[in-house]
Image: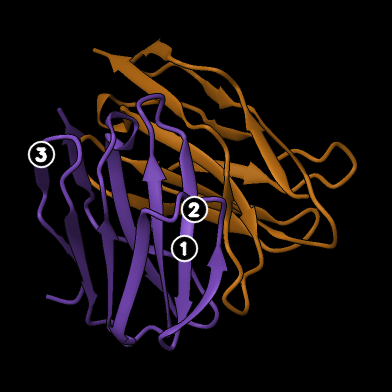
Amino acid sequence: DTAVSQTPKYLVTQMGNDKSIKCEQNLGHDTMYWYKQDSKKFLKIMFSYNNKELIINETVPNRFSPKSPDKAHLNLHINSLELGDSAVYFCASRPTTGKLFFGSGTQLSVL
Amino acid sequence: GNSVTQMEGPVTLSEEAFLTINCTYTATGYPSLFWYVQYPGEGLQLLLKATKADDKGSNKGFEATYRKETTSFHLEKGSVQVSDSAVYFCALGAIQGAQKLVFGQGTRLTINP
């Protein structure tokens, strides 16, 4: 299937742990994104990569570090998890012109 | 900077009712405008878009018109169905290049049979 896929779908962890969320797209898109959706459903961009190069880096704690090994992958690593990091994280990709394609989300719960 | 404001939710309607979800924006330049929909348990999907003033985007019975004079892009549907229950996001951004989309806060819509 052609899609944006992210894993895991659910992630429950303790405060202080380090965790990663993986994202892969097989659509051949040049640009990938990470968005955070908070409990009020507000969606905020975190990072964007274009051909493995970081092009958007919003005001995000430096505990969050994106990694793009190739243009089809954009992983999100989070160090020293905090309660406030609990949210749904969406990966997305888009071609140079056109709409965003979203993954189905990773629900992160920090206990 | 660019920003999007949508009407507060949640919105609850009966089946076959008329729907309007308001969206207004502030932007520099001439961005494109979008409505995305998020069904329960899924990621966002593009519902419709408009790329210039007076354009009307439409899909699945939903419509929205790019109104530059009122800086608005309200979403409308004449007769909603239970299957339209979802969260709707208004967004703006460039349709070319790798620029980010700026999203509104989302409006949860529930349609009762």
Secondary-structure class at tag 1 = strand
**Left/right of residue A49 with respect to residue B1 in the rendered view:** left
Q: The residue marked by circle 3 belongs to what chain?
A: A
- Tell which of A19 and B21 is nearer to you: A19
Residue under pointer 1 = A47
Q: Residue at x 15, y 46 (%)?
A: A17
Chain letter, purple:
A
Q: Nearer the viewer, mark 3 or mark 1?
A: 3
Tell me which corner region of the image, top left, top right, bottom left or bottom right, holds residue A75.
Answer: bottom left
Question: Chain B, which colour?
Answer: orange
Q: Amino acid at mark 1?
A: Phe
Earlier residue among tags 3 and 1:
3
Q: Residues within 10 Å of mark 2 (few under 14, many from 20)?
A: many
Secondary-structure class at tag 2 = strand
Alpha-carbon span between mark 3 and mark 2: 23 Å
Residue B88 locus on image (x, y percent): 44, 35
Judge whether A24 appears above or below B86 on screen: below
Residue B28 locus on image (x, y percent): 84, 56
Tell me which corner region of the image, top left, top right, bottom left or bottom right, holds residue B87.
Answer: top left
Q: Amino acid at mark 3?
A: Thr
Residue under pointer 3 = A13
Q: Are marks 3 and 1 on the same chain?
A: yes
Q: The residue marked by circle 1 belongs to what chain?
A: A
Using the image, tell me which numbered label, if any, was put on residue B22. Answer: none
Q: Residue at x 49, y 51 (%)?
A: A60
Residue B108 locus on image (x, y percent): 40, 24
